[in-house]
Image: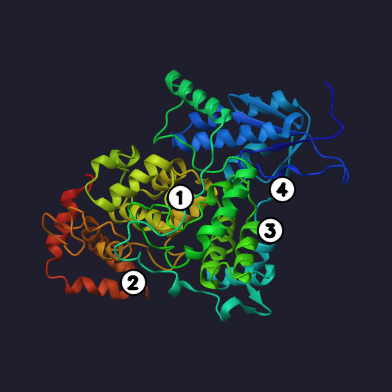
Amino acid sequence: MTTRTTRQHWLFGDQLGPHFADHRHHGPDAQAPLIMIEARSVLSRRRFHRAKAHLLLSAMRHRAAELGDRVRYVRARTYREGLAEAAGRDRVTVCHPTSRRALALVESFGQVDVLPAKGFLVTMADFATWAGEHARGRLRMEDFYRWVRREHELLMEGDEPAGGRWNFDDRNREPPPRGARTLDTPGPWRPDEDEIDDRVRHDLDRWERDGTVSFVGRDGPRRFPATRREALASLRHFVTHRLPCFGPYEDAMLAADPVMCHSRLSAPLNLGLLHPAECVDRAERAWRDGGAPVAGAEGFVRQIAGWREYVWHLYWHFGEDYRGRNALRHTAPLPGWFLDLDADAVTARCLATVLAQVRDTGWTHHIPRLMVLGSRALQDGWDPAAVTDWFHRCFVDGYDWVMLPNVVGMSQYADGGLMTTKPYTSGGAYINRMSDLCGPCAYRPGDRTGERACPYTTGYWSFLHRHRERLAGNHRMAQAVRGLDRLGDLPEVLAQATERGDAAP
């Protein structure tokens, strides 16, 4: 067997940007030859969204086409078989994988040297130092976010935050404009599919016919970037056309405008096609050039330099035991209509609309995820591990590191408050205030009982009652819990919630 003098470097499917490939082993002029492995077992192991599978394979194959002779692209049943074909027994390198399972896999091979993680603003070592300095108290995203802003000089004016404030949330929580079906802004960036997309779709069709894989959701046309060029075009389009209106309506929902002014950059970011630094730098530049208000730029920077970075590091900081957290002891299985993305089975307009968005695109923005999908799961007591798996499989930007802290910690409060200070759920009043989804609905957001009782309003009070003892001691929930005592119809509310069971609301 011939041993290469320059070790090959392995690129995972979420390590597709130039910052992953430009790894040099032997001086500034020697680029490592590359390996990419398309392992069918990844798709056959779980029932992923069809659009997610299409995006991943399209992005990998586009990247391989760009790299040309520098990469050896192997299609194999498993990663182990693919690595054996590509490298034999030679040692290879890989940037730190993004999941614990993938890290354990490459370490088990015995021939892979794991290099530091790329694709984030904060190194693991620097986060460990920051977390150690806060070990005596609670880790808070706000503290982390301000530290990142200072360390990376993001939206800073000397030692002070831009605009004199760290947080512009009070300006970034507006309901949608009254009477508007859509926001008055250009539509989101869209790619043009090519022959690589055609071949991916052909392969997915064939594998489904063969029974090799099974998907949920619909595929096509592709909505998200699959190449570096497309990712940069999407970023430019967002900063130019959508960042100016992003801030005020980032928490709002419109039935006919699911994207609103959101960037949809999470997918190319999580594929490694974009680096977070270039995203926040462009947003800051737009503000400094007068192209976006400081509140909107801050809201976008907060999502990437604050929340995204924080979630990545908490995934590793909390450890593998975090996966099994279930502080509220929720064990109900996910109902079939939810697992199958059967929006047509749902009467509640908010849930039907959002579930259809997931079915058709594999994406919704963060408020439908948290306050419609996640809130339904929390109120009905679904198993948080199963909810995490569903979000991972059904969203094009879903990865283990993304969804585990977001779902277990924030959405389902299954960690008992390690990550957030309260459960995120509400009655129909919040959805009614922040959207146009309730008007034509068969249910009324203010009704707790009766034929037109809103399942979110009924579910909210039932949830508070079920966890009253735990939540009464939470300073952010105490007032809401005391509200139970003012409900003269609480027995009827609880009966209504029980009667519905796992039927589609």
Q: Nearer the viewer, mark 2 or mark 3?
A: 3
Residue density around tag 1, few if under 14, some if 14–19, many if 20 or more, within 10 Å: few
Q: Does residue 158 appear left or right of residue 301 in this picture?
A: right
Q: Nearer the viewer, mark 1 or mark 3?
A: 3
- Residue 477 got which mark? 2
Give the Cα separation between the discs numbered 3 and 4: 15 Å
Residue density around tag 4, few if under 14, some if 14–19, many if 20 or more, within 10 Å: some
- Residue 19 got which mark? 4
**Rendered image quadrant of residue 486:** bottom left
Give the Cα separation between the discs numbered 2 and 3: 35 Å
Which secondary structure lies at badge 2?
loop
N-terminal of the pair, mark 4 or mark 1, is 4
* Quadrant of the image containing the N terminus: top right
The spot of residue 473 in percent (x, y) is 35, 73
Please determine whether, in this image, residue 318 is positioned above or below residue 296. Answer: above
Identify residue for label 1.
Answer: 324
Q: How many marks?
A: 4
Q: Residue at x 52, y 46 (%)?
A: 400
Give the Cα separation between the discs numbered 1 and 3: 26 Å
Give the Cα separation between the discs numbered 4 and 2: 44 Å
- Amino acid on which the number 2 mark rests in the picture: Met
The reply to whether dot 1 and dot 3 touch (C-beta < 8 Å) is: no
Identify residue for label 3.
Answer: 123
The reply to whether dot 3 and dot 4 touch (C-beta < 8 Å) is: no
Residue density around tag 3, few if under 14, some if 14–19, many if 20 or more, within 10 Å: some
Q: Is residue 45 visible?
A: yes
The spot of residue 101 in percent (x, y) is 57, 41
